[in-house]
Amino acid sequence: MIAMRPEELLHPTPAGLYCPPGDFYIDPVRPVARALVTHGHADHARAGHHAVMATAHTLSIMAIRYGEDFCTSRQIAEFRQPQFINGVSVTFFPAGHVLGSAQILVEWKGLRICVSGDYKRMPDPTAETWEPVACDVYITEATFGLPVFRHPDPAREIARLIRSTADFPDRTHLVGVYALGKAQRVIRLLRDNGFEGRIFIHGALAELCDFYEASGIVLGELHPATVAAGRASDYACSVVLGPPSAFNAPWVRRFPDPLIVFASGWMRIRSRMKQRGVELPLVISDHCDWDELTASIRDTGASEIWVTHGREEALVRWCELNQIRARPLHLVGYEDEVE
Amino acid sequence: MRAFAELLDNLVLTQSRNRKVELLVRHFRDCPDPDRGLALAAITGDLELPSVKPALIRQLAGEVCDPELFRLSYDFVGDLAETVSLIWPSKNDAGDPPGLGSIVADLSHASRTAAPAMMRRLLDAMDASERYALIKLATGGLRVGVSARLAKQALAEFGNVDIGGIEELWHGLKPPYEALFAWLEGRAAKPVSAAPAPFRPVMLSHAAEERDIAAFTSDEYVAEWKWDGIRVQAVSEAGIRRLYTRTGDDISAGFPDLVDAIQFTGAIDGELLVRDAEGSVAPFSALQQRLNRKSVSRKLMREYPAFVRAYDILVDGDDDIRSLTWLERRRRLEALVATLSPERVDLSPPLAFASLDELRGHRENPPETVIEGLMIKRLDSVYVAGRPRGPWFKWKRDPRLVDAVLMYAQRGHGKRSGYYSDYTFGVWRGSELVPVGKAYFGFTDEELKRIDKFVRDHTVERFGPVRSVRADAGHGLVLEIAFEGLNRSTRHKSGVAMRFPRISRLRWDKPPAEADRLETLEAMLD
């Protein structure tokens, strides 16, 4: 029996999810005195806070993105090691989303609330493996919270890309990936599934790829895709990775007859493929699909679910159908479209 | 089925027209009869499986998914077939799906009562992409960005023949088009056109540019009103009467009132229009009531009687007169129309003009709102298929323009789900903004992203899929709205309703205080 209302321990504010007894925010979207950060994606990890607690990898990623002075004081959170902030216990657990990503368990007076951050359950050698966290209230993301989203085996998806490089050797396969997480995962998938061609990367991916490599995640030889005017033969049978924004920039003009590939969970929806002008859509996601979201809700054993950023209504509906108390949590500032 | 599903997946993701044609040609080459012909019929919209209706698909979806979760999914995906194909639970042990030929044969003979079980079995045996192809095949409307004309283009390339030859044959052919493929592969002679009263490819115009306009003189050109209806070809030969659209679709079944009145031998070209209760030409919205129907009620024919405003003639009696000049054809047309019921077929009148200024005057002040502008044709132009540059021009009225302020934005569907893409805009009445219309096109994908970001950054309130956006004298986004006409409306708070509003420019530079006032709009009322 919980005596206290969970909202007393954590509730949404315009700056982000706030814990009054601990006086800290989780993934705040405005500068605050004390922030706990789940992972390094820019909409969750912002610069300008006073004190930041996050995993060592996340802190390093923030320093790479924002410079060493991104906050005044840093505190490393080790996985599964509780720490106390003003008497409130906080523990980080792996979220499997990107390297260093964490779920945060907040515990006070016997009440356990777990904030999922962004997470995925599929095995991925470029991120720590997600694990379920027993809690009373589970705050879950819902990026792919609709029963139309079922992510296929990523090995099968990457095989389609590898086959296409053989079928169309003269066309440059330009793969749209975000710099943190997706880029490194796609590179590892290519290596682990027998791709033998060369891999080129856009300059915006270089620092984070180096960081992954230095953290022990082997990516192999990566060539810079910076040659001013490539000849067709330079890119034959190879793969070029870049951030999707670069595909609209003059950078793409150097590649002969590019074939646009995009790796994202959104690539299950035809309209999204068309919108992005994608010729080869790969359903490779750093988030849970519908079945994984609902399985996670059960696995945590939580009696109450708060659903945030994404398709909140559908996941709340699923909870209702399964007699689990649930409500949407309207947090602003998270980009569910960026995946 | 795999090959057909892959063809659809590839077509939908291929922007280039040439690559689409390539994909189709490859399919015609690699896929055997009757599957390739059925795929072709599905693409051209000539395949009907009446035992499978969208209602049946919804019913099947209801058996596998909670209705509320289905509604939310459908709302997000924006397409029924796609939603069902993705939501349907995959069964790996259901065996391989049958081929396209046997699926079509089974479903076309299936009774309404047998069809659900048959569809359920097929869906179980397929993957998401095949399920999508099956549902699209059964319910029509593939939406793969391939028009019937492009499919015919692919056939022409496949067989290395002229597309005109295929278009003129088309109406005598039936799926799965085995005789056509045999001819295209050189295995048999060209099929004899079995259809009497065939469609003949129409002549199209270019939009007039300044350099064209400078040359418009009444010595060389004739001017006519450009009517806001749809282009049709009315053909009557050997006792067979047909009404075709400009792409050769036979729409006779929807217009029996008009088809009965085509009492001549020949083929004429004109605008299909309907009349209102007073007998005047009704606006396009009235004509729309009668389009896309396989049959038509007496009530509808009484309320919106259809007629053709004729402007050209291709065949007069047994004479194909397409090689005569416009002036010569016009005399033949006048003689022929004089023999017909004027309530059903009348003449598009030529407009007298002594100078370019007079012509501009006609264009800016048409006597009826159903006129979109002018058609300008060379007097010596022969009637040729396609869109030759030079003989025929369309010269539309300039749209009306107004500067309005973005007030609300709604999340789009389908292609635009996830983007705030439907905009409600308003103009000033005193010191408040009143909404005057909605627009959801007229901007590029790049501009859409910018507006979407603006909406997200300046949201004041959220109501479900709608956000209200900050809009006051000092802050907001001004949109230049183009529209075709303005009517009084009791349904809108502002009292006015725009026709065909779209965004013509984004005025990031303009302060909202300088947007237009309601009085400005009221002065533009038709």
Image (cartoon, rainbow, N blue to C red):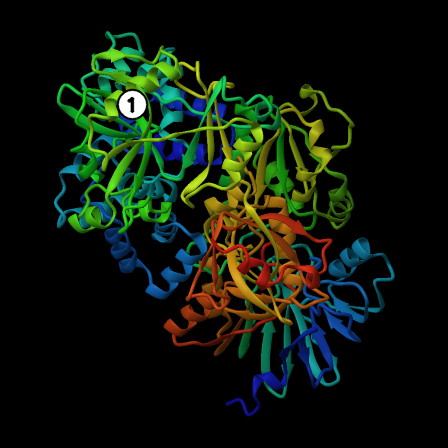
Residue B17 shows up from this direction: yes
Q: Is residue A82 above or below residue B272?
A: below
Left or right of B215 on screen, residue B37: left
Image position, residue A187 (x, y; %): 64, 40
Residue nearer the viewer, B516 or B293: B516
Q: Quadrant of the N terminus of chain B?
A: top left
Residue B199 shows up from this direction: no
Residue nearer the viewer, B200 or B485: B485
Left or right of B489 on screen, residue B451: right
Element under label 1? Answer: helix
Image position, residue B494 (x, y; %): 51, 66
Output the chain of dot 1. B
Image position, residue A216 (x, y; %): 73, 48
Q: Is residue B185 above or below residue B313?
A: above
The quarter holding residue B23 reads top left
Residue at 43%, 42% in the rendered image: B367
The residue tagged 1 is B334
Q: How many marks?
A: 1
Circle 1 packing at 10 Å, graded few (<14), some (14-19), many (20+), is: some
Image position, residue B227 (x, y; %): 39, 37
The quarter holding residue B45 reads top left
Left or right of B118 on screen, residue B501: right
Residue found at the very far front of the displayed protein: B354
Q: Is residue B59 above or below residue A7?
A: above
Q: Amino acid at mark 1?
A: Glu
Residue at 48%, 46% in the rendered image: A271
Residue nearer the viewer, A108 or B254: B254
The quarter holding residue A224 reads top right
Left or right of B145 on screen, residue B93: left
Residue nearer the viewer, B498 or B474: B498
